[in-house]
Image (tube, helix red, strand yellow):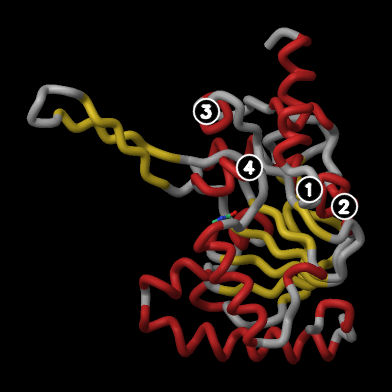
Amino acid sequence: MESANVSDYISQFKEKIKGKGEESMLLPEKFLICVRCEDGVKREEGQTPIPGEGIPNAEVMLIGESPGAEEMKSGRPFQGKAGENLNRFLASAGLDRSKMYVANTTRCRPYKETVRILKDGTKKITKSNKPPSQHAIRSCATWLDMEIDLVNPKLIVTLGSTPLKRLVPDYSISEVHGTLLTVPIQHAGEKEDSREFTLSEKEYHVFPLYHPAAIIYRRELQEVFEQDLHKLRKTVEELKLNSVLL
Ligand code: URA
């Protein structure tokens, strides 16, 4: 990428999220042109990877999976339906997303394309979301780790299996959802684009939740999820993280 393009990208991104959290971007500007994985390479014209956003020293950090189409358009995590669901679920437990820091495990939309030939012979290409590959998760690891180090949250809430496996690979979401873990987390190595993981010396409080989107299409999880949110609220109170209460 030519250097003139780099600064164009950066100023376009800043313009896109003006007044909506650009002042809280913790990552260096070169993050906005990252192409370390296939999802970065496949970004659409004018789109950037999506940085985390929120309170820079938030007591609680939420970590989702990957951005979707809405997020890639707006430049911000958890927008559209996914964002509405997340905000509503948190609010139902008296928790305020705007007092937290919200980030994703990977930062560009993982998608697959399906080509259909219409009756008139024209091609229609549809994009649909897919889970991020291990390569994308590892390629994005240093960005997430940088944010975890800078925010230094007292509690990390993982949404779904992807961020849990990234940070705490030995646990499965079906076993530990709705419980407080106090554990070392996986960190990418020292090199800027390291894909090697080691365990942190420090122990973190990690609270795994199912992904809010899973609750929408797996109705059987709804009750469990509500109970987990209730437990999250109790944990927040026990840890005295009052800044995130509504
Ligand atoms: N939008 C996000 O930003 N992350 C998710 O995990 C899902 C939707």
Inspect the image, locate mark 2, and give the three-letter code of the amino acid beneath it. Answer: Asp
- Picture coordinates of residue 240, whole percent (x, y): 89, 86
Foreground mark, 4 or 2, reads 4
Q: How far apart are marks 3 and 4 (CA)?
A: 13 Å
The one nearer the camera, 240 or 19, is 19
Q: Mark 2 points at which residue?
A: 149
Local secondary structure at mark 3: loop
Of labels 1 and 4, earlier in sequence is 4
Q: Residue 107 carries which label?
A: 4
Q: Distance between the residues labelled 1 and 2?
A: 6 Å
44 over 148 or under it: above or below? above
Q: Name the residue under label 3.
A: 44
Q: Ligand 1 shows up in which quadrant of the image?
A: bottom right
The one nearer the camera, 89 or 195, is 89
Foreground mark, 1 or 4, reads 4
| Quadrant of residue 137 within the rendered picture | top right
Residue shown at the point (67%, 87%) measured from the top left: 93
Residue shown at the point (65%, 66%) measured from the top left: 158
Of labels 3 and 2, earlier in sequence is 3
Q: Can residue 12 be seen in this view?
A: yes
In the image: residue 231, left or right of residue 82: right
- Picture coordinates of residue 36, whole percent (x, y): 63, 27
